[in-house]
Amino acid sequence: MTKVCSSFDSSKAKRKELTDAEVKRKAVKLVISHMKKKISQEFIGSEHVNEWIGDMDKLLDSSEFNLSEYIQMRRSLNDVIERTMDESMRFKLRDSWCSFGRALDKKVKL
């Protein structure tokens, strides 16, 4: 006869329940990591984008999540995009801007 283990050990049971803020933060981190890959080359206006990413990294490192700060960073990203002279890079950054907005709309899946 085979002995069956009666204890239920599932990865779902061990998972920490995420809040909407944590989901949003993770989604924004993913957008920023993709953005860093996009701007790996030099272009006119890259210093503004790199400065913005540095500010965004500081915001992501903070322990609390304040949605209004993230919205303000998205607005400032729009300003940075308008200062970028390289047209193809501007289009790539606009895609990131849209992704950033979708990341802020994320909610916990039930």
Image (cartoon, rainbow, N blue to C red):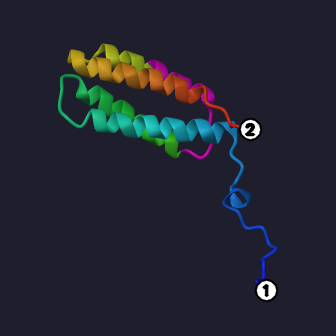
Residue 65 on image: x %, y % = 62, 38
Q: Quadrant of residue 20?
A: top right
Q: Determine contact: label 1, label 2, CB under 8 Å.
A: no
Residue 21 on image: x %, y % = 65, 37
Quadrant containing the N terminus in the rendered view: bottom right
Specify the principal SS of the magenta part: helix
Residue 64 on image: x %, y % = 63, 42
User: In the image shown, does 42 or 103 lie closer to the viewer?
Assistant: 103
Residue visible at 45% across and 20% down?
Answer: 98
Residue 35 on image: x %, y % = 35, 33
Callout 2: 10 Å neighbours few (<14), some, many (20+)? few
Amino acid carrying mark 1 in the image: Met
Q: Quadrant of residue 43?
A: top left
Residue visible at 54% across and 41% down?
Answer: 26
Residue under label 2:
110
Res 24 seen here: yes
Residue under label 1:
1
Given the current orientation, which residue lies at the most extreme right position? Answer: 6
Q: Earlier in the sequence, mark 1 or mark 2?
A: 1
Residue 73 appears left or right of 51: right
Mark 1: which secondary structure? Answer: loop
Residue 45 appears left or right of 4: left
Mark 2: which secondary structure? Answer: loop
The span picked out in magenta is 62-75
Rendered position, 41 above or below 96: below
Residue visible at 82% across and 74% down?
Answer: 6
Rendered position, 72 above or below 53: above
Inspect the magenta stretch and tell me whether residue 4 lies in it.
no
Quadrant containing the C terminus in the rendered view: top right
Amino acid carrying mark 2 in the image: Leu
Q: Quadrant of residue 49?
A: top left
Rendered position, 22 above or below 100: below
